[in-house]
Every structure is written in C-alpha cells, then in structure tokens.
Amino acid sequence: MREVHLAGLDLNLLPALEALLKRRNVTEAARDVGLSQPAMSRALARLREVLGDPLLVRTGSGYALSPRGQQLSAQLITALDHVKAVFRDPGFDPAKTERVIRIAGIDTHTLLLAPPLMARLAREAPGIDIRIVGYSPNIIAQLETGEIDLAFATSTTPLPPGARTETHARDRLALVLRKGHPMAKRAWTPEDYARVNHVGISIFGDAGSDLDAQLARLGVKRRVALVTPHFIAALAAVSQTDMATTLSRVFARRFADQYGLVLKDPPLPNLDLELTLVWSEVRAADPVLAWVRGVIKEIAKDVLD
C-alpha cells in the first residue's frame, strides 16, 4: 500500500470531494462549497489525478459514483466529522466536569478562600476537586507542565515571560500586637519597628521581605526573631509574646478576637496588598481553569474587598 504524506496533500480539496460525492453533480457541488462550475471541474480533475480514479462516471442520466467513489463516500463522512471535531469548541459544563485542580498557596488562601470556594463548587461543579499545594522554587516550570494549574501571588512577585496574572482583590497590611502589649496603644513610628522583636512570614525560609525593604529605605532595621511560612502561626506567636507581626489585615481581623489581638496601621508609605492569581500561557485557553479562575475572582472580592 502506498504511504500518503499529509504534507504533500492539498487538504483544500476535501470540501470539494465531500460535495462531489454527496451531490454527484458538478454544478450542485460547486454551489455547496461556493465555487464556480469551472473551479469545481478543475477540483474534480485534480482529485482524479491524486486518487487515481475517475470518482464520478458520466451516465445517460447524469453521473454515477465509481466503486472507489462509493467506498470514499462512506469513509469521508466519518473522517470529516473527526476532522471538524478537532476545531469545534468542545464546550464546558461545570456540573458535568470531573477534574482535580492544583493551586499553589498558603494558609491564608486555605482559611479565607477555600471554604467559600468549596461551597460554590459543591453547588455548581461537584466533580471538581481542589488541592492546595505548597510553593517550590520551580513553580513556573510546574505551571508550564501542568503539575500545578494555578498559583496565588502578590502583585510584587517577580514572574518570567509566559506567566499570566490577574489581580483579584486588594487588601492592606496591618501591624498586629497582642492586647496588653506595652506598645499597643501608642501611635507607631518607623523607628518603633526596631524596638520590638518580630515574626516574619517567608514561603521559602528567608526572613527578607518587601516590608524590610521599605524599612531599609527609612533607615530602620528590625529584628525578626521568628520566621514561619504560616500566617496563623505568626498570629499565635504574637498572641502569647511581646513580638509583633505585619501581615494581611483581612486575615488578622478574622482571628483577632480568637487570639486577643490589636490591629494598627503600620507607619509605612505603602500598605497595599494585592491578591494575584498566576497561570501559564500554555493553559490560558483551558475552559475549566478559566471558569475556576472566575469563581476565585468573585470569591476573593467578597472576602477581601
């Protein structure tokens, strides 16, 4: 059997072939595909050359299919249906979708966003499961390969080309102390950051942060006595010591009564904290991920804004 190479075929002939085999009439086939009759006649001549068969044979009453034409007529309907399916919008029904979505995040996202997200999915997409996973240094590669579908970040997180982002909600930083802290009732200055020990939040174990960079520009250096990747652990540590921490106001307010905390505005020029969702350009058109991103955006605005 002679092997056929797609690169050497004129696939534009397929619509003409389909119409000719269906109509068995050059004029009617030309009308179906929007060609002139001479153009369809040329297409038929080319098809006869490529396939090595007359396909349509003139009879006293018109045209009849050759044996090869009859065989192709049955095959072509199925083949073209498969080809068209490649380019057809697959559609998306959340209620019928079964999928595991992996999102890189930390405890703030799990505690603030996961409960309303799972409640929404239970109503609208019960087959979609969520896995909140930790960050790793190769997170961008994980996004590109699909090992991770989405990742939470802040607007200041540096991202390489090929990563798409969208800011979903805006929060503010809060200076958090325990009730009864010796400095809880006074108005803080930047220099006060150097007068107490702090709990720092770091995903990768490094105590440095945007906050330290802001303080450095003001000539202030704080001592970070405890570094943890968990925001809830920072609040727990502050609640039982004279340390302070600076983190999401929405998150701290959620647990202020439980831990006996006081929230203050930090004496800093920039208190904005934006929640951003990151995904790879490779999966930007995935309808399931696009829908989940939209749901997260709505929930984040409700919870944070």
Image: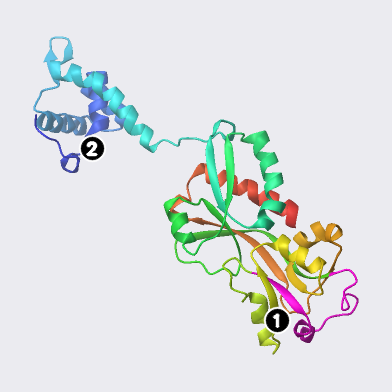
Over which residues does the magenta segment extend?
178-201
Residue 96: x percent and y percent?
56, 30
Q: Quadrant of residue 36?
A: top left
Q: Which residue is mark 1?
A: 223
Tell me the SS state at disc 2.
loop
Residue at 87% in and 80% down: 187
Q: Report the number of discs.
A: 2
Residue 285: x percent and y percent?
47, 47
Instruction: Name the side, left or right, on which 178 lies relative to 224.
Output: right
Residue 280: x percent and y percent?
47, 56
Based on the picture, tell me whether residue 179 belongs to the magenta stretch. yes
Q: Which residue is mark 2?
A: 11
Residue 35: x percent and y percent?
26, 33
Mark 1, residues whose alpha carbon is within 10 Å: few (<14), some, or many (≥20)? some
Instruction: Name the side, left or right, on which 256 lies relative to 153.
Output: right
Residue type indicated by callout 2: Leu
Instruction: Name the side, left or right, on which 268 lies relative to 78.
Output: right
Of labels 2 and 1, earlier in sequence is 2
Residue at 32% in and 33% down: 83
Residue at 58% in and 47% down: 131
**Residue 278 circle label:** none
The foreground one among 84 and 45 is 84
The foreground one among 187 and 162 is 187
Residue closest to the far top: 60
